[in-house]
């Protein structure tokens, strides 16, 4: 089998803030931007990895999601427990400095973890947890 990760999903509740974070702060390229207002689906990804993307999408846009489920999703996003992603960089300290200088909420400064990685954590504008590991 030949399977790759093509895209991952993260919710947004403010497309402009999410776009600014992923494009301007993390340096991802915008691959697609459809819809309008809060109902926008924005696809971003690293310029040197055209086959891997993150789809920033409105939460609970699926018509099969109930009103109770929508409320739960909104509550989880507010707490920062709904979406997360793990990224990696060769320059963790430089990346963290850029994130710290932006509007990103710092959750954890670069730290050597007991399980063998060095990483940091921030939240994007929608509250999604973004952990970034240092490539070694």
Image: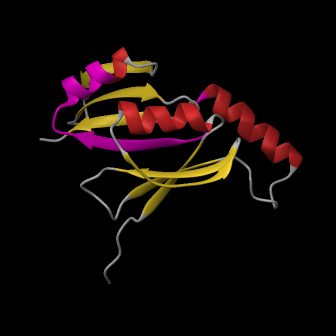
Residue found at the far bottom of this picture? 1
Q: Say if the magenta span includes residue 135.
A: no
| 27 in relation to 122, above or below | below
**Colour pattern of the rendering:** secondary structure
Q: 91 left or right of 5?
A: left
Residue 105: horizontal and vertical position, in percent?
Answer: 47, 19
Q: Which residues are magenta?
A: 80-98
Residue 11: horizontal and vertical position, in percent?
Answer: 60, 44
Which image quadrant is residue 62 in?
bottom right
Most foreground residue, 120 or 23:
23
Most foreground residue, 44 or 107:
44
Determine the residue positioned at 88% across, 46% down. Answer: 67
Q: 86 left or right of 58?
A: left
Determine the residue positioned at 36% across, 60% down. Answer: 52
Q: Say if the magenta span includes residue 83.
A: yes
| Quadrant in the picture for the C terminus | top left
| Quadrant in the picture for the N terminus | bottom left
| 135 in relation to 47, above or below | above
Which image quadrant is residue 99 in?
top left
Which image quadrant is residue 15 in?
top right
Determine the residue positioned at 69% across, 47% down. Answer: 36
Residue 104: horizontal and vertical position, in percent?
Answer: 45, 22
Residue 69: horizontal and vertical position, in percent?
Answer: 80, 46
């Amino acid at each position: 089998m030949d399977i790759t990760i093509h895209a991952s999903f993260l919710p947004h509740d403010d497309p402009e803030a999410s776009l600014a974070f992923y494009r301007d702060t993390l340096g991802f390229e915008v691959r697609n931007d459809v819809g309008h207002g809060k109902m926008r689906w924005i696809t971003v990804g690293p310029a040197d990895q055209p086959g891997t993307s993150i789809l920033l999408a409105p939460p609970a846009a699926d018509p099969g999601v109930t009103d109770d489920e929508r409320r739960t999703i909104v509550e989880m996003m507010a707490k920062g427990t709904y979406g997360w992603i793990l990224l990696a960089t060769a320059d963790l300290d430089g990346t963290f400095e850029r994130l710290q200088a932006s509007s990103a909420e710092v959750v954890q400064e670069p730290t050597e973890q007991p399980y063998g990685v060095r990483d940091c954590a921030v939240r994007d504008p929608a509250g999604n947890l973004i952990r970034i590991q240092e490539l070694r």
